[in-house]
Every structure is written in structure tokens, then in C-alpha cells.
């Protein structure tokens, strides 16, 4: 390929009259214009789209890179978002339950779940445990588990109890956590361990998050609980004891221990009375141990959630 260097000067003059030599600048201009025209024609055929292709292309959509922030400057935006999420969750459930595990609930949803938990457990047991079954001990812990040791007159009766528990919102753990064995010829002894799967009842008339007290109201609440227990037939062992307190965001959680004795039915009546009176307390732990006669020893740990 011949390369033409238009910047190189001529080394000398050719012989002959000067009037027959074409001007150098004119020759250069002609060469440049010709090369440019050829290049345009070549690349136009090779790379430029036809008019039909241009017409068929969809219009370009520009993505905005800046947004007006004024709509999200409200100070109560977190509260509004929580309301929207709660509405979406309520619509996505069964219409009655928010079917999520305890650890996946938001903080205020956990507060509601916890306060309803004790009532849900003992209402479930009243449905699932038939006559002829006696509990030696019952432990409810951490809003997630139920552990019981009991006796039944026949193996069939104990097996029916296990089946009834499975039909409730429980996960019955296999051996060695749950089993049935002979009680030395005197009926059958059993151990049952369950994980709860209640979900959050969105239609219950008592939602504790609507009744959260201030921290100054906690001593008054503890006295109310003592009084409700006494009217239900409980005998307390001393005053409630504060164990600890923890701060979570704009809330503080107070842990109290209550001890006493009562019949099993009176203790259940006590729990239901707390719900009826809309007392915002949650039983993190309930431990019932059978004593002589119909009495049970009660050791419980309650949580009060208060605003700072």
C-alpha cells in the first residue's frame, strides 16, 4: 500500500517551465477530499444502520438518577412503614393468624405473641389432654416449648393424648424427647416435648402493643397481678421479685419472678383473668410441680414491656 506523506517537502525542483506545474496545495486538497469521500461511502455501507432499522428501534428510556426527598422527610416514617408491613402481613396470612415463627416476628409482634402465649398453651392442653391423664410436672419455656411428664391408666389413653397434641399447633419431638413406657405395672408413664407453632392471632381483642405502660407503671402492674391471683385462689410465696431489666430501643423489659401454690384449675383461671383484664404481662417461664392432693407448686417468670 502506498502511503502518501503530505507533510514531506519536495527534495528539489524538476526541470521544466514553472507554468506547467500544478500547485502543491491544490493537489493536496483534491487528495484529502477524495479520501474522505471514499471513507464515508465505505463506512456508511458497512456500519451505519438503515432507516428501517432506526425506525424499528424502541425509544430509549432514561433512568432518573436523582429523587425528590421531600416525601420521605416525615419524622414518623418508621411508624407508617410498620403499619404498612403489618397490613401486608395480615392480608397475607389466613385472615386470622400471622403464620410466622416467633423468631421472625418484629419486636412489637413478639410482645403481642408473648402476652397471648400462656393463655394459648393452657387452652390447648384443656382440649388435648383427656380425663384419666395426670401431669406430674409441666414446664413452658421461652414462648416456644412445652415439656410435660405424666401418667395414664392405659397405653391407648396416652397414645390418644399424643395424637391429640399432634393435631394442635404443636410439633411433637420424637424419642428420646417424647416417649411412653410402663410404670411398673401401675399404668403408663410418658414424657412429651413439643415446639409450639401458634402464630400471632391478629383478631384477638387484646393486643398488648396497644396497652404498653410506661416504666413508672410497672410497680402498680405487679400489684394488680398479685391481686388477680389471690382472687383466683392462688397463695403467693412472698412478694414478686425483680430479676433484671434490659433496654431494647425505646422500650425496657422487666423480668419478675412469682412463686406460689394453687390448684391447677385455679392457676388456669388466673391466666384467663389476666387476659380478660388486659394486663400486658407475658409468662416467659411457667413451672408447675404436682404436690399432695390437687395442689401444684408454681414458679413463674413474667416479662413486662414498658416505654422509656
Image (cartoon, rainbow, N blue to C red):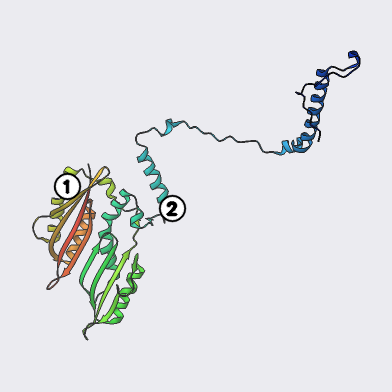
Residue at the spot 29% in from the left edge and 81% down from the top edge: 155
Observer-nearest of 237 and 245:
245
Residue 9 at what x, y percent from top left? 77, 21
Distance between mark 2 and mark 1 Cα atoms: 35 Å
Residue 58 coordinates in the image, percent (x, y): 67, 38
**Residue 239 seen in the figure:** yes
Q: Nearer the viewer, residue 89 or 130?
A: 89
Where's residue 217, x and y in %? 17, 44
Can residue 133 be seen here? The reply is no
- What residue would you read off at disc 1? 218
Look at mark 2 in the image and give the residue it sits on.
92
Q: Residues within 10 Å of mark 1 (few under 14, many from 20)?
A: some
As helix, strand or loop, the secondary structure at mark 2 comes to helix
Q: Are marks 2 and 1 in contact (CB under 8 Å)?
A: no
| Image point (33%, 56%), residue name | 102
Residue 42 is left or right of residue 16, and the answer is left
Quarter of the image containing the C terminus?
top left
Amino acid at each position: 500500500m502506498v502511503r502518501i506523506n503530505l507533510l514531506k517537502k519536495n527534495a528539489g525542483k524538476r526541470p521544466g517551465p514553472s507554468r506547467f506545474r500544478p500547485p502543491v496545495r491544490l493537489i493536496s486538497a483534491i487528495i484529502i477530499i477524495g479520501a474522505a469521500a471514499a471513507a464515508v461511502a465505505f463506512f456508511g455501507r458497512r456500519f451505519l444502520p438503515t432507516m428501517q432499522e432506526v425506525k424499528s428501534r424502541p425509544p430509549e428510556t432514561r433512568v432518573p438518577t436523582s429523587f425528590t426527598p421531600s416525601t420521605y422527610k416525615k419524622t414518623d416514617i418508621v411508624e407508617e412503614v410498620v403499619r404498612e408491613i403489618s397490613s401486608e402481613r395480615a392480608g397475607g396470612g389466613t385472615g386470622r393468624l400471622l403464620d410466622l415463627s416467633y423468631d421472625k416476628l418484629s419486636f412489637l409482634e413478639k410482645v403481642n405473641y408473648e402476652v397471648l402465649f400462656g393463655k394459648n398453651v393452657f387452652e390447648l392442653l384443656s382440649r388435648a389432654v383427656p380425663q384419666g391423664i395426670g401431669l406430674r410436672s409441666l414446664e413452658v419455656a421461652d414462648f416456644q416449648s412445652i415439656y410435660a411428664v405424666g401418667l395414664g391408666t392405659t397405653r391407648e389413653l396416652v397414645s390418644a393424648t399424643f395424637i391429640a397434641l399432634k393435631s394442635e399447633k404443636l410439633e411433637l419431638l420424637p424419642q428420646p424427647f417424647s416417649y411412653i413406657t410402663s410404670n411398673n405395672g401401675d399404668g403408663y408413664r410418658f414424657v412429651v416435648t413439643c415446639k409450639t407453632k401458634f402464630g400471632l392471632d391478629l383478631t384477638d381483642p387484646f393486643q398488648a402493643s396497644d396497652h404498653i405502660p410506661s416504666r413508672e407503671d410497672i410497680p402498680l402492674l405487679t400489684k394488680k397481678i398479685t391481686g388477680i391471683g389471690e382472687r383466683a385462689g392462688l397463695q403467693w410465696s412472698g412478694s414478686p421479685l425483680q430479676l433484671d431489666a434490659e433496654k431494647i430501643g425505646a422500650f425496657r423489659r422487666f423480668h419478675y419472678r412469682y412463686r406460689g401454690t394453687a390448684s391447677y384449675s385455679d392457676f388456669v383461671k388466673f391466666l384467663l383473668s389476666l387476659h380478660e383484664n388486659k394486663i400486658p404481662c407475658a409468662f416467659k417461664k411457667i413451672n408447675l410441680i404436682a404436690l399432695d392432693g390437687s395442689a401444684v407448686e408454681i414458679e413463674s417468670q413474667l416479662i413486662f414491656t414498658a416505654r422509656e
